[in-house]
Image (cartoon, helix red, strand yellow):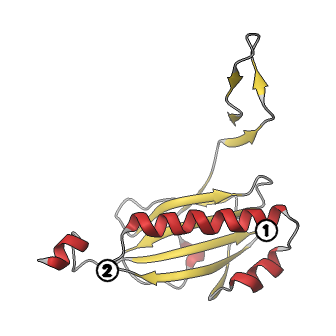
């Protein structure tokens, strides 16, 4: 009974991966099999890590030096980090969170899969048709702040 409170489906395996992609390489930063850890906590941990990574990159650390500091367990090849990982309809892979740096040079993901995987280059991907552009503070004639995020098609 207690197991059911921690995990709605105790027989379902869930593997959580934190990925960092830059250029044509991807790196597995974390691999966790956490059937009793809440998905919310894993996602919060991911966003804390992505904020730290973003801060370090903003302060001028190179990707290579960053990866040495945080560590990684696996490297994989990909066509382009601009082809974003998407959730797969049959439940094999779900994207729980994505984080990009402002220069759109690096992307981080937290994904959950139903089975352990080692080849991340073959995850379902698509090229985004929308780009997010961050602008400086924009104000209308009345001095009210407007959204500083736009999508370009």
In percent of the image, x 22 and y 78: which residue is there? 10
> Would residue 58 appear left or right of 80 to someone viewing this image?
right
> Would residue 97 appear left or right of 75 to someone viewing this image?
left
Quarter of the image containing the N terminus? bottom left
Residue on which the image places disc 1:
56
Secondary structure under badge 2?
Answer: loop
- The x, y position of residue 152, in whole percent, is 70, 35
* The quarter of the displayed image where residue 141 is located: top right
In percent of the image, x 78 and y 60: which residue is there? 105
**Mark 1 packing: few (<14 Cα in 10 Å), some, or many (20+)?**
some
Quarter of the image containing the C terminus? top right
- The x, y position of residue 103, in whole percent, is 80, 54
In percent of the image, x 70 and y 18: which residue is there? 144
Secondary structure under badge 1?
Answer: helix
* The quarter of the displayed image where residue 107 is located: bottom right
Q: CA distance from mark 1 to mark 2?
A: 34 Å
- The x, y position of residue 39, in whole percent, is 39, 67
* The quarter of the displayed image where residue 14 is located: bottom left
Sequence-wise, which precedes: disc 1 or disc 2? 2
> Would residue 85 appear left or right of 10 to someone viewing this image?
right
């Amino acid at each position: 009974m207690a197991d059911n409170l921690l995990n709605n489906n105790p027989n379902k395996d869930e593997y959580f991966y934190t990925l960092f992609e830059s250029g044509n390489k991807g790196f597995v930063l974390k691999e966790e099999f956490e059937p009793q850890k809440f998905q919310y906590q894993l996602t919060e941990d991911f966003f804390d890590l992505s904020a730290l990574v973003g801060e370090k990159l903003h302060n001028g650390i190179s990707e290579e030096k960053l990866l040495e500091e945080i560590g990684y367990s696996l490297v994989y090849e990909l066509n382009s980090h601009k082809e974003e990982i998407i959730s797969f309809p049959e439940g094999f892979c779900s994207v729980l969170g994505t984080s990009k740096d402002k220069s759109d040079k690096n992307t981080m993901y937290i994904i959950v899969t139903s089975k352990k995987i080692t080849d991340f280059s073959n995850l379902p991907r698509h090229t985004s048709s929308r780009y997010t552009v961050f602008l400086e503070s924009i104000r209308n004639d009345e001095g009210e702040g407007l959204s500083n995020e736009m999508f370009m098609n």
